[in-house]
Structure formats: structure tokens, C-alpha cells
Amino acid sequence: MFRHTLAAFLTLAVGSLAVAGSHVGLVTKVSDDEVTFRVRKKPDDKKSDFTEEMKVKVGKDVKFYTGPASKDAEPTALSLDDAKKAVEAAVGNEKRAIKGVLARIETKGEGKAEEVTRVVLFPGKRK
């Protein structure tokens, strides 16, 4: 009985990890309906450019954060409007070579059912 329960638990745990995704990329647009970002073609190749564009629907319980100032600190929560402003400022800044905000985007689901659940923006140094 214990083995069957353990096997069922492990199947559910592994299955839930298979449908959840995490992407690191440049967020170029945030709207009420979707998040547009670019990822590397080969995620393991740190020297490749962010060329693959992805658009993922925003889930109803999506949370936006700005990255921590240090490794020990927690990310700071942002509203959807603040996230939109941060991305628009980074994309519209003529001095920046990279048009977008580096971010970690966490999703659930696959294909057309994929939804963004959490976005942590790393805007870099602000002056």
C-alpha cells in the first residue's frame, strides 16, 4: 500500500515539473494579455544572442517582481503597470545597446495553454 502511494506521489511530482517551464530572456513587451520576450536559441550557449521570440499569455494570478539588490535579499513585488513602465523605459532608452529587460519568466502548461505565472525583472543599474 505504501509503495503504491509513494509511486502515485512521485508520478504527480514529476508530471507537474514536466509542464512547468522557466525561461531566461529579454522581455521586450508586457501587456494585459501577454508577455513578449526573446530567448537564446541554445540556452546552454551563453555567448549566443537572444534571437528566438516568444509570446506567452498572462495568467490571471501572475506576479511581477524586480530582482534583488543582493544575493541574500528577496525580490520586490511590482504591479502590472510598474512592470509595463520598466520594460517600456528599457526598450525606449536610446543609450542601451540591448532593447529589453533581462528577466526570469516562469510558466505553466505547454503550447497554446502555456501561461506566465511569475516574472522577475533584472533592470540593471539605474541612474
Image (spheres, rainbow, N blue to C red):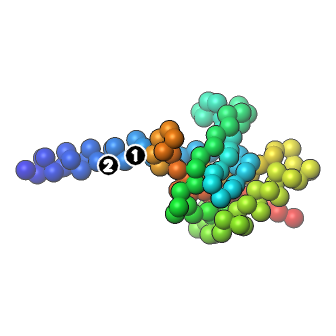
Mark 2 near mark 1, Cβ–Cβ under 8 Å?
Answer: yes
Circle 1: element type: helix
> 13 and 54: which one is in front?
54
- Is 75 left or right of 126, judged from the image as shown? left
Badge 1 local density, few (<14 within 10 Å), some, or many (20+)?
A: few
Circle 2: element type: helix
Q: CA distance from mark 2 to mark 1?
A: 6 Å
Q: Which residue is mark 2?
A: 13
Q: What residue occupies the far right of the structure in this picture? A: 94
Q: Quadrant of residue 68?
A: bottom right
Q: Quadrant of residue 74?
A: bottom right
Residue 47 position, x and y percent, is 71, 32
Residue 2 position, x and y percent, is 11, 51
- Is 38 left or right of 113, judged from the image as shown? right
Q: Is residue 49 above or below residue 105?
A: above
Q: Name the residue at 51% across, 41% down.
A: 112
Which amino acid lies under the numbered mark 2 shown in the image of this protein?
A: Ala
Badge 2 local density, few (<14 within 10 Å), some, or many (20+)?
A: few
Residue 105 position, x and y percent, is 59, 50
Q: Name the residue at 92% across, 50% down.
A: 94
Q: Name the residue at 26% across, 44% down.
A: 11
Residue 125 position, x and y percent, is 80, 60
* Res. 17 mark: 1
* Res. 64 mark: none
Which amino acid lies under the numbered mark 1 shown in the image of this protein?
A: Leu
Q: Is residue 109 visible?
A: yes
State how many labels appear: 2
Q: Is residue 21 visible?
A: no
